[in-house]
Amino acid sequence: MTIDSRSGIFDLSCTDENGTQFIVEMQLGLAPYFVQRMKFYALHKFNTLVERGEFDYANLPKLYAITFLAKSILPTASFHTIANVRGEEGEIIDTQMTFITLELAKFNKQVAEIETDLDKLVYTMKTLHNTDPHTVPRLLGRGVAQASN
């Protein structure tokens, strides 16, 4: 809470060289209302991008709300969900604000099945606490000798 209004506090907030905004939130425990919390965080950040007075909304930067969840909360089968404003036929209406959710509990690939950089990231996040240190460099496509340089 602030004196004049509520504020959003997230784990990481950054801006790239093009002005694109990123907010990142990580949640280890079960959070059944996490979607509502992410909407609150994203809309709070969105409101800080709008200047007082006459403002050209066409110049708003893109905003990505990225969440890493240890548990499953979405009613989707995939571990990786991207959401934008869509119409009733599923057509994208707006991509200015994008919600990206990664649910580690739904990721069940084994090392031999890993193909993409996203697979590598999520596998590493999910298993690093009990992974042999020699496995990580091989997983990332580098030999152990190269990884230590």
Image (tube, rainbow, N blue to C red):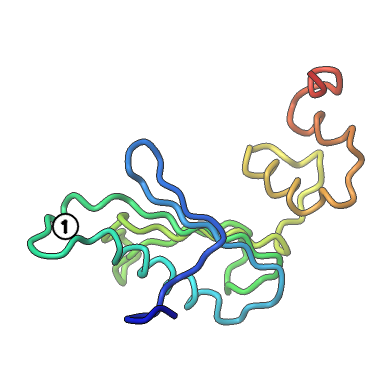
Quadrant, the N terminus: bottom left
Residue 74 higher or lower than 91, as above or below: below
- Dividing the picture into quadrants, the one containing residue 89 is bottom left
The residue at 31%/72% (across/down) is 88
Q: Is residue 119 left or right of residue 143?
A: left
Residue 131 higher or lower than 29, as above or below: above
For mark 1, what is the residue?
A: 57
The residue at 45%/71% (across/down) is 8
144 or 41: nearer the viewer: 41
Where does residue 68 sit, x and y in percent of width and height?
Answer: 62, 60
Where does residue 22 sit, x and y in percent of width and height?
Answer: 44, 52
Where does residue 118 sit, x and y in percent of width and height?
Answer: 62, 43
Q: Is residue 9 left or right of residue 136?
A: left
Quadrant, the C terminus: top right
Dot 1 alpha-carbon crowd within 10 angstroms: few under 14, some 14 to 19, many 20 or more = few
Where does residue 45 sit, x and y in percent of width and height?
Answer: 37, 63
94 or 34: nearer the viewer: 34
Q: Secondary structure at mark 1?
A: helix
70 or 148: nearer the viewer: 148
The residue at 43%/62% (across/down) is 83
The residue at 45%/49% (across/down) is 14
Give the residue type that dot 1 points to: Tyr
Q: Is residue 140 left or right of residue 43?
A: right
Q: In the rendered picture of this protein, how many numbered marks are placed on residues?
A: 1
